[in-house]
Amino acid sequence: MQKLLCRALFLCLLCGPFTALAKTTVTVHKADDTTCTGEVAAVADGAVTLETKSAKGPPKRTKILFSDMAQVVFRDPPAKVAPQASQMPDANAGSASGEPVGIMGAIRSIFGSSSSSTSSVEEEQPKKTRKPAKATTRAGATTHAAAADLGAWSISLINGDTLQARFETWADHKIKVKLGAPLGQSVEIPGDQVAAIWSGNTDAVKKARALKVEPGPDDVVYAQKDDDVVSVTGQALGIAGDALNFRYGDAERKIAMDRLVGIVFGQGGQSKPADALSQSFKLDTGDILSGSWTGMDKDAALLRTAWGEVVRIPAADIYTVDMVNGRVVYVSDLKPSKVEQTPYFGRVIPFRVDASLDGGPLKLSDAAYAKGIAVHSRCVLVYNLSGNFERFRAKLGFEQPAGALGRVAVRVLSGGKVLYENPDARGDQPPVDLDLDMTGQHQLTLEVDFGKDQDVGDRVIWANARLLRAKPPE
């Protein structure tokens, strides 16, 4: 018996460190504005079970349903966040007319030097009508060999997710990539889930976005030509070696990947984002990945994506998990239908979401916040709503320390009706909690106007701004 006990102890010491679930402490923000902090004991069946130590007796376990959550905070957000798409020109950028930029010679120059007669572009007919891309041919119809090492790319999905990855293969309507650190695993993404891909060339991407090509059924490819960027509309078919196969009109051509700046995929080939409850993981790298949080594996969260892939996300690299399509909808996750920003000393200071105006964390005099909108006077943001919300809640205050001298006029409106107004909000005053009735309202307007003094400190934060749906009947 003693030998058996010693052997069992030895095996526990040998195997324990490799099988034990690492303790991850999180804070759950619930839809009713209460919070619960504890170690994650389990994630299963649409709920998180937290374990909290008790002064008397065994640890206490609390099970919280995803449907009752707003956000799970693993830790504070990074000191600096990556530039946000909402602060940049529209991803479907192009000329005001919506036509591809550049003459036919420029368009030819971005393709390979193929002499095939079936792949020529007629200069005599530069405005020839092209057939719309079919959804069934999106993301490639034939199998291609694995891509060469093409560097890191940013992949935007239709649900708003953003991933840094390297291409492995792209064919048969599927794009296989290897995700960047800390994820590091290979995933295969259906083509209809991808909204756009962009290269790591920041300057070229800015030029591409500035072209303002109107979205349509076809794909828009942006490629470098000398020191400029031009756009071509057609069908992206996949990667063969170090080139993109691309159908332009009735011809199939190749574009060298080292000249490719980005692709905005045609709306005709995209699926609609799911409207079911899901979880959106935000990582230090700027990656955002959504799906169903199905469990914890040692020191990582397990996430099943919308297309069925299981991704392992290290807990140490997660800072928040937001509930998507739940009772709570953060205003910073919505796109305003109208934005009015008045220049401050001749320049516009753009509003930012989930970050301060300089890109750091959102800080009021009482605390730091992971979610919210930072604005500078004068700024008016209008959001169109579905009408099924019952409350608007936020902590309204001034960015610290830069906003300590601020003085503004603030209003919250809906359809012309004033829900809240403070004509003299000041930076030396404590933040204000807002809880406003939104029953039956179809619009939300957040207005920060110039105050009575100079505008040096007019840096206002709508911290934790959120809309609350009515709780479904039991």
Image: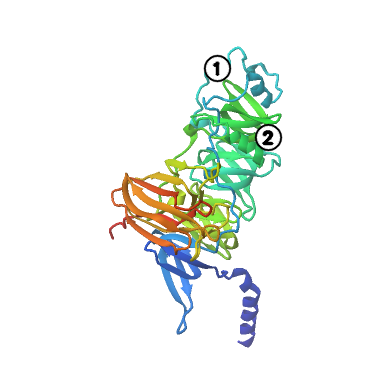
Give, as a three-letter code, the residue at label 2: Met
**Residue 413: image x %, image y %?**
35, 48
Quarter of the rendering occupied by the C terminus? bottom left
In this rendering, position of residue 65 left or right of residue 248: left
Question: Seen in the image, is 37 located left or right of residue 393?
Answer: right
Q: Name which residue lies at 55% across and 47% down.
A: 84
> Which quarter of the image is occupied by the N terminus?
bottom right
- Of labels 2 and 1, earlier in sequence is 1
Label of residue 127 in the image: 1
Which label sits in the foreground, 2 or 1? Answer: 1
Return the x and y of residue 464 as percentages of the image width and height: 45, 58
Which three-letter amino acid code belongs to the residue tagged 1? Lys
Q: Nearer the viewer, residue 415 or 9?
A: 415
Q: Position of residue 97 (x, y in %)?
A: 51, 25
Residue drawn at point x = 53 percent, y = 43 percent:
348
Query: In this rendering, does residue 148 appear at all?
Result: yes
Q: What distance separates the C-alpha of mark 2 from that of mark 1?
A: 26 Å
Q: Residue furthest bottom?
A: 2
Residue corresponding to mark 2: 257
Judge by depth and name the residue closer to the eye, 123 or 352: 352
Q: Is residue 234 above or below residue 154?
A: above
Q: Is residue 324 visible?
A: no
Q: Determine the image quadrant of residue 433.
A: bottom left
User: Mark 2: which secondary structure?
Assistant: helix
Q: Are marks 2 and 1 in contact (CB under 8 Å)?
A: no
Crowd class of label 1 (few under 14; some 14 to 19; many from 20; radius 10 Å): few
